[in-house]
Amino acid sequence: MSDVRPRPGDPVITPALIAEHGLTKQEYERLVGMLGRTPTFTELGIISALWSEHCSYKHSRPILKTLPTTAPYVLQGPGENAGVISIGDGLAVAFKIESHNHPSAVEPYQGAATGVGGILRDVFTMGARPIAMLNSLRFGSLDDPRVRYLFSGVVRGIGDYGNCVGIPTVAGEIVFDPAYANNPLVNAMCVGLLHEEDLIRAKAEGVGNPIMAVGARTGRDGIHGASFASEDLSEASDAKRPRIQVGDPFTEKLLLEASLELIKSGHIVAIQDMGAAGLTSSSAEMAERGDVGVTIDVTKVPTRESGMSPYEILLSESQERMLVVAKKGREDAVRGILAKWDLTAAVIGEVIAEPVYRVTEGDRVVAEFPGSRLVTDCPSYSPDARESSAIADLRAADPFAIPERPEERDPAWTLEQLLSAPTIASKAWAYRQYDSTVRTNTVIGPGGDAAVLRVRGTNKAIAVKTDCNGRYVYLDPRVGGRIAVAEAARNVACTGARPMAITNCLNFGNPTRPEVFYQLKEAVAGMGEACRALGTPVTGGNVSLYNESPSGAVYPTPVIGMVGLIDDLSHITRATFQRDGDAILLLGELGGELGGSEYLATIHGKVLGAPPRCDVEREKALIDALLEAIRAGVVSSAHDCSDGGLAVALSECCIANPEGVSGAEIDLSSHSALQDRAILFGESQGRIVVSSPAPERVIEIAAKAGVPCARIGRVLRESDTLAIKLPKRSMRSPLARLRRAYHETIPGIMARTPEHATFDELAPVAAH
Amino acid sequence: MKFGIVTFPGSNCDYDAFQAVTDILGEEATYLWHKDHDLQGSEVIILPGGFSYGDYLRAGAIARFSPIMQEVAAHAKAGGPVLGICNGFQIACEAGLLPGALMRNLHLQFVSAEVRIRVENSDTMFTNLYDRGEILRMPVAHGDGRYVAPAGVLEELEAEGRIVFRYADANGSISADANPNGSERNIAGIISEGGNVLGMMPHPERACSALLGSSDGVRLLESILARVAA
């Protein structure tokens, strides 16, 4: 071991400094025990980042281990930059989702943009060319001007970054609920395509191999971003704006091309993004995976400005940087490839046999940790888990005890209210700002149940989607976790794809609170049940805890990113009605539940009741039956029933595509045991609206699979109405009104705020 | 016929153009690196879409100084076909191969959508397989697509039939609603005085497959073949 002493000018290690670095007393003692001495300021900074929740998963690791992660086609499960599955023909898909919630809460444009940049790098460092971006966004109510500022900033940030790099943004979801008012969720997912033989892992190997910093220079931005992301948001968060990184998509595009060329060249053994906790975590993680030691000289790191301390260089989260382990002797070849793209590469360290993580500043050792398991030798916690009794009471409440409002006598009124609820209404205002067609693979873009991308050189396509209903998870985390997976699977299945695997982003509150930790544990248990039943293993993901503001925690929101495979391009199926005269069928049971519905939230301002039941075996049978019907060529369209229930699903089938509007006639009058409002707006799971020219065949296939299936109406291309007969009454909705509600709501609301309102014009977090 | 597709740093539709030429048209294509001075015998040059140099100064303003652009300009001057799509249209304007300029979209937002354009002149080397007045469907995806030019230039373009495409609605009428970016006179594409440089904001290379929504762009590429071969 080396002699490590404080640098001249380093602050003295005091309890206050330790607390400022987010370490508990026990964690600090563990650090001292590990070193056998007092840490230096630099070492404290390193551990503060590595043991932050964001890097260490110290509260979630034991829970995540319960998830299924294997299938014959999984080439890379959790623990790498991204998961990878084989799709046959020697091709594979790499994909991963990640959060950028905290930065986006303070600086929406850069927060979202750098979230996109980071997840892109996670995918192309596996040797995959990114082919699609998705994003899963949660905001407060759009009536709040600051929420509109956050929403428009996040959308512009996502668009400007992805558009410039030239990766289509093809799908996602946007939910508005007061639960996310001061703590928006911004999750970005990237999907890439690679030849199996090009798969590369971020594992440092080969004693003597040089470690190189590649891409942009290191500056003083984003220092301690990982720690910032691992604490509650507060009045003080705005002051931590310097912890937020600034993105440069142009450099990212160059880095993408250079990195793929580098991987192809065979000059390198490993590559990893310098993401959260920058150089520190990328080097520590690569060393740990390879079970080797590393030494890094910070004076060799190309910096943007002089005078940066080792602490700053190690913890900077400047964007568009990569850490590469090159083969010894190939340094110049690596530099040559980077130079072609006007980027730099510098040797900053070496893989060593000695099991130690060492940082030097020239000859002086400024940090040194024994062992090569710096990241996982972190504390691991299993705090108390206890359900909040207030939430249990909400779940026990009977939604049917809520009387109908007088306006509900005409269900068409209720339907229009729901279609204009921002969570349900068309999100074209946002996705029109995203290039969704670049790279010419997008068969179904934003607005469908899932996006579909053809795979060039094959007759296959992949379907991708993100999903989660946080309200369900809030009311019952076990069931909500199941539903998140099941809904994502149904969505990709509706396009004709077999669900293959998931990535997940667990957005929760502060895990040291027992009611939050209970939600985390239960939701992951529910996800695991659904993943096992549906045969969709987890290949990786991200955990974002401490999503709390002074007004409380967000809804527990485990976002699922699903990838499905379509074996034959002719099986690609759309959500909207396609052919005049087709029969409309409901696959699955009508249900009749109301708990946790958008109806209760929008019409009655209530979040209560048990969320819909979710039987994962039945979900599996439903998906199998749907796919068999699609493969048999008897399905014209398929659309999942989710927020807003059957009536909203049917409306979307009629009007979601402004270029191809159809009317429909529906008869549900025989279900007299159920309340009209539950038939129309209840959100029972496991239901898909299918249109078909051969309904008997669909019914036969469903019966064989043991899935209920009923003919409920027909498509009338020329009709200008959606007509639904109910047990107690009937409704007729002019399509023009449904279209207005669905398509014009969000543009109308967003026109209220000038596009370029400055930050100062809008109240900061503290004022709320 | 050999197509040369210029790759600037930040180009991101070069691949799509390459695929359209090789896969759909079945012709030869090669990437031309921005730092080179060699067109490699290309008979048709495509300036593709993207964000050359990040669009950081002004879209296309830096790319025009790329070494390869000297050769592209010489090729255009000699009457060789040049097709500038999206960012390529912006570069062609900045380089003086076409008049006018592309400004920030009027609504200040990036716009990604399928639009309709009306063929205003079917007597060009890029449009001879279309009918005049025909309505085509193609994607647009840009933040700076609002075509502007001095009134005199616009009149000249009109008089000489050099406005090749205008944004239109499904019925072919040239309305403000059909205009995705606020372009003057709904201009979506213009051609040079010599008739050999076409700049357009919509993406014909993304409209080459019914599977992806439209194959209306194929005939634009085929038109070049038909004319140059003739």
Image (cartoon, helix red, strand yellow):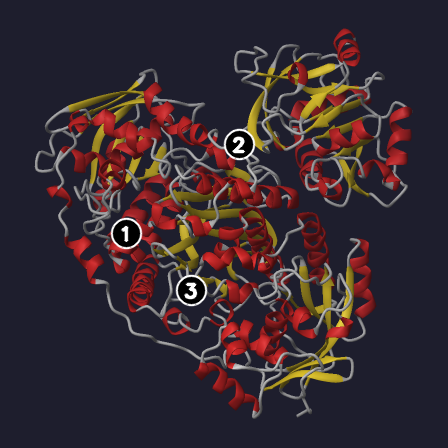
* Disc nearer the start of the sequence (3/2): 3
Residue B129 is at least partly visible in this image: no
Check disc 3 and give the amino acid type: Ala
| Location of mark 1 (residue) | A472
| Chain hosting mark 2 | A
Question: For the N terminus of chain B, which image quadrant?
Answer: top right
Q: Residues within 10 Å of mark 3 (few under 14, many from 20)?
A: some
Residue at 72 percent across and 81 percent down: it is A360
* Disc nearer the start of the sequence (3/1): 3
Residue A59 is at least partly visible in this image: yes
Residue A481, labelled with which disc? none
The image quadrant of residue A523 is bottom left
Classify A755 as above or below A245: above
The image quadrant of residue A311 is bottom right
Q: At which x and y percent is residue B123?
A: 75, 12
Is A191 displayed left or right of A426 in the figure?
right
Q: Nearer the viewer, mark 3 or mark 1?
A: 1
Q: Camera-side residue: B59 or A754?
A: A754
Q: Camera-side residue: A420 or A14?
A: A14
Determine the secondary structure under disc 1: helix
> Are dots 3 and 2 in contact, CB under 8 Å?
no
Check disc 1 and give the amino acid type: Tyr
Q: CA distance from mark 3 to mark 2?
A: 50 Å
Q: CA distance from mark 3 to mark 1?
A: 29 Å
On whether disc 1 and disc 2 are found on a single subunit, the reply is yes
| Location of mark 3 (residue) | A71
Q: At which x and y percent is residue A506?
A: 41, 60
Residue at 29 percent across and 74 percent down: it is A384
| Chain hosting mark 1 | A
Check disc 2 and give the amino acid type: Pro
| Location of mark 2 (residue) | A754
The image quadrant of residue A536 is bottom left
